[in-house]
Image: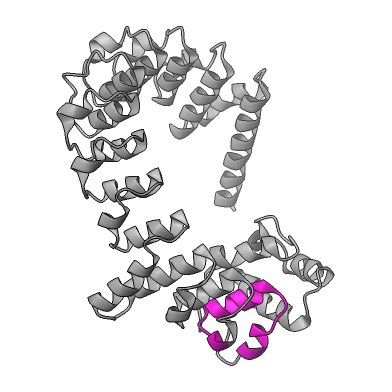
Amino acid sequence: MLIVNLPTLFYPIFVVGNLFNGNVIGGKLSDFEDKAKLAGFGESDIAVIKRIINGNRTLIGDNEDWAECAKSEHAIVRRLTAQQGKALNMLVGDVDEYTRMYVAENGYKLDTLIDDASPIVKQAVISAIAKSEQSEASKRRKIQKLVYDSSVSVRMAVINAGYGYDKLKNDSSWEVRKLIASKGYALEHFIVDPHYAVREAVADQGFGARRLMKDKSPSVRARLVKAGFGIKTLIHDQSPLVREAIALAGFNLREYLYDESPIVRAAVAEYGFGLQKLSCDTSEIVRAKVAQKGYALSKLSKDENWFVRLCAAKSLYQENQFSKLKRFAKDEDERVREFASTTLKQIKDKEKRQAA
């Protein structure tokens, strides 16, 4: 029996005829068959796909005529065939890039597919080569062939396979440079990178903390704090983003309880400090965070702001205080009413099932 990767296989259905809206597994098989026929699927194709859908995991038997599947006019059937490692010689030159991707994932004709025009195919080739039993020298020689590929995603695949760090450290794409930095390579080089996201990757590792504490980007300084560095130095940083990170780390909470920024005060609440005072905060962002912590729910259930009330309702549900949810079913805000009504119905249905 052959297991089918459902999430991957159902993507093609969006491409072929737009038959489904993502809920195909939960739908009726008869509905699928009717729609498939209208979209031009033949009986043999429908038979193959029905085997996938039925029971959420139906399998293709080894006696399936894979050669016929490989000739199907519908990409989903050809993709399924390639994914199962069948009729690869027929599918290696398929017009559909996802079919060729599955061929590559099976390790077939990698020397041919490495020159494919599609980035997703080349990514699959890189992954297959990296996982193969070839010698390290052979892997390096083949993968390095794609180190300067025009596609950012391919160059990133090269890096993720463990190659090309030095050649790509000055890449034009900040995403590529960030990925290399996140691997801990050439941090001294990347600490002065012009893009803040690359320097964030350096900060995540605590490298060059003294220098990064003075970085012009608040997000870099905040990431440094999250990594556990520079907290005392940055405790009065001008950016709320940095002070928020410090509060979430549990430092300087008494002072931050009165911080001018609601983002910082919300972080204090998230840490669980000063909840009584913060339950009366002027900012709904802060009061909502208090409600999410499950504090002062009786008061916050009547808050003037709908989102605060919604957070209170959700906390009551999480604490199994179901009887207190009834008042929200009559809330003035539709979003709060919908949550309460839906939740109460689910609770009632569950109780009925348990009683049966």
Q: Nearer the viewer, residue 204 or 342?
A: 204
**Image point (18%, 25%), residue name:** 230
Vertical relation: 148 (above or below) 73: above
Count numbered badges in the picture.
Answer: 0
- Residue pushed farthest right? 38
Choose top left, top right, bottom left or bottom right for residue 53. Answer: bottom right
Residue 298 horizontal side relative to residue 133, left or right: right
Q: Main secondary structure of the magenta part?
A: helix
Choose top left, top right, bottom left or bottom right for residue 44. Answer: bottom right
Q: Nearer the viewer, residue 95 or 78?
A: 95
Residue 173 visible in the displayed image:
yes
Horizontal and vertical percent position of residue 271? 30, 24
Vertical relation: 113 (above or below) 188: below
**Image point (24%, 37%), residue name:** 191
Colouring of the image = one colour
Residue 276 horizontal side relative to residue 102, left or right: left
Horizontal and vertical percent position of residue 86? 54, 86
The verdict on residue 70 being magenta is yes
Horizontal and vertical percent position of residue 94? 61, 78
Vertical relation: 191 (above or below) 92: above
**Image point (60%, 42%), residue name:** 346
The verdict on residue 147 being magenta is no
**Image point (18%, 41%), residue name:** 188
Residue 42 horizontal side relative to residue 125, left or right: right
Horizontal and vertical percent position of residue 154? 43, 60
Residue 65 visible in the displayed image:
no
Q: Nearer the viewer, residue 10 or 199?
A: 199
- The magenta segment is 66-89
Q: Nearer the viewer, residue 59 or 198?
A: 198
